[in-house]
Image (tube, rainbow, N blue to C red):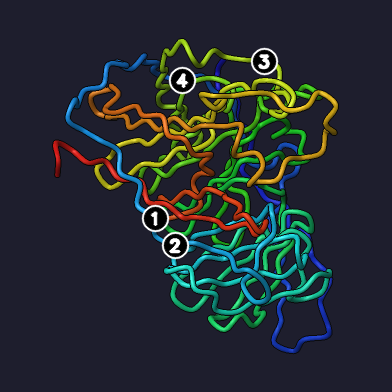
Amino acid sequence: MNPRRVGNGRVRRRTNRTLCCPQLKRTPVVFLAAGLVSASVATAQERVTIDATPSCEGCTLRLTKVATLGAPSGLGELGVQPTINAAGDGRFYVWDTIEPGKILVYDSTGRYVRAFGREGQGPGEYTRPLHVISRGPDTLQVVDVVQRRATTLTADYQVMEVQTLPLSFPRYIELGGGHLVVNGLVQSRSAFGLSLHVLDRSFNVLHSFGPDPTVIPGQRYRQVRALAAAGDSQFWAAPSNRFAVELWDTDGNFRLELLREAPWFQEWTEPSNIPRLARPKPQLVGIHQDADRHLWVLIQLADANYRPGSQAADERILEYPEVAQYYDTIIEVWDISRRRVILSQRVDLHLHPFIGRGLVFSARQEADGIPYYDIWRLELNQNGR
């Protein structure tokens, strides 16, 4: 399919000014409008099936626990479905449903520091603050995916600015110049079904593109992509339902598709069942490129000793500590330049990738029912080094 592009004009929409806070600005952003933002659909310029034979027999995987988040009660206590951000300022920012709208702050060792925010729709209030983005030593941005707002905060978490966003995005990465690549859908005729978008520092949409614009009810996985930076102007994107990773640039060019053949990961077109009731299907859930240009790929799949739960169980969403019993994680490291697998290893952990700075986390529950969240650094140990 040949890429299609439209004009690059922009439409601005004013937002209502907030009167309660003298220091607060509400900033207009650029919204997508039909025929006015660069958009394209593309096919890969190159497709390569990588060599699946591990190239480093002496290599091993090292998981180093860097922090544990949670507390028995009171300050620092977490619930069973937190969202964890490892921000560029070295801290962990956690949104949890125990106190909706509140964001908990932990230092790099997992020590609870403080909390800020509250539930609501005013300045400094949130519904689902899914992302916390560090914009230098003195500035943070909190992205609320329900209210579609970005709140800019000072180093002591005072509100500076609130912006309305052109789309809600569950996944993002930061590239050079403060640009973001986000995965989500926008309400625009020209960009309908396109799931990848480049945003500038002010959250204006610069480009929208994607490999598959087909939107089918009940098949949201078609637009879902795990993301990883690959330099200042390129990034990796990976679908959840097949073993493949795509290389894109920020102009919307589909540079490369790396394909991995594995008997334990067959492409699927129907979403996974509830793991309590039926064996879950493999899902590619996370990717990360490290400083050595190795690509880390994480796949969640059924636990090696998987057993279904009661068939009479309800269909509620499983909580993190509970769901861990049904899953293992396969961690692979790929040599990008040589197009081959370096290492492939299965671990008896349900890892949640990647929360920032190349870190992942797992959930566990103590005998007293208190949930804790272990933060892990993944490292490749090459030939004993």
Q: Which residue is mark 3?
A: 269
CA–CA distance between discs 3 and 4?
21 Å
Q: Which residue is mark 2?
A: 67
Viewer-side residue, 17 vs 80: 80
Residue at screen point 55% across, 26% down: 301
Vertical side of 51 occupied by 310: above or below: below
Q: Which marked residue is nearer to the observer: mark 3 or mark 2? A: 2
Residue at screen point 26% across, 21% down: 54
Q: Which residue is mark 1?
A: 65
Disc 3 is placed on an element classified as loop
Vertical side of 352 occupied by 87: above or below: below
Dot 1 or dot 4: first in sequence order is 4
CA–CA distance between discs 4 and 2?
40 Å
Apparent side of residue 330 relative to residue 122 in the rendered image (left or right): left
Name the amino acid, label 4.
Ala
Q: What numbered label is drawn on residue 44?
A: 4
Q: Which marked residue is nearer to the observer: mark 4 or mark 2? A: 2
Residue furthest out toward the front = 367
Q: How many marks?
A: 4
Q: Give x and y (percent) for residue 67.
A: 44, 62
Viewer-side residue, 196 vs 300: 300
Q: Which marked residue is nearer to the observer: mark 1 or mark 3? A: 1
Dot 3 or dot 2: first in sequence order is 2
Name the amino acid, label 3.
Thr
Q: Which marked residue is nearer to the observer: mark 1 or mark 4? A: 1
Vertical side of 296 occupied by 344: above or below: above
